[in-house]
Image (cartoon, grey):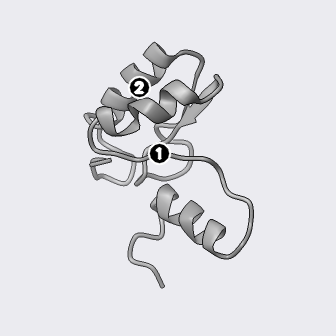
Amino acid sequence: EYANRRDKKVQQDLVRQAGLRAVRQACGSKFEEVEDFLKSESYPVVLKPTDSAGSDGVKLCHTFEEAKKHFHYLLTVEAVNGGYNEQ
């Protein structure tokens, strides 16, 4: 069992390690850590908090600016599971 089983990045890393197709992704606690990734992707992109449940915090972003704004929002809002996202 994985302690961080709700972490969406960990989930996709495990899927990829198993040899299955996984989403392209970037993760970071600062916008600068994901900025190059967001600049290189086609839009729209989906932003998800790493630690939450259901569709909480999930947003389809149509522009780079919208993705940047939502990234910062995710680091400040309380998740449905009572915690805060650190990345």
| Residue closer to the observer: 69 or 80 | 69
Q: Amino acid at mark 2?
A: His
Q: Would you call the spot at circle 1 few (<14 residues within 10 Å), some (14-19), or many (20 or more)? A: some
Q: Which residue is mark 2?
A: 70
For the view shown, which residue lies furthest in the right direction?
20
Residue sitting at 29 percent across and 37 percent down? 75
The residue shown at (33%, 28%) is: 73
* Residue that carries the numbered disc 1 in the rendered image: 26
Q: Residue at x 41, y 26 (%)?
A: 70
Q: Against 14, is 44 above or below? A: above
**Quadrant position of residue 79:** top left
Q: Quadrant of residue 81?
A: bottom left
Name which residue type carries label 1.
Ala
Q: CA distance from mark 2 to mark 1?
A: 14 Å
Reply above or below: 52 against 60.
below
Q: Position of residue 39 (x, y in %)?
A: 50, 25
Q: Position of residue 71 (x, y in %)?
A: 38, 31
Element at badge 1?
A: loop
Give the camera-side residue of 23 and 86.
23
For the image shown, how many numbered marks are present on the structure? Answer: 2
What residue lies at 49% left-to-right and 57% top-to-bottom? Answer: 9
Q: Which of marks 1 and 2 precedes in the sequence? A: 1
Residues at discs 2 and 1 in contact (Cβ within 8 Å): no
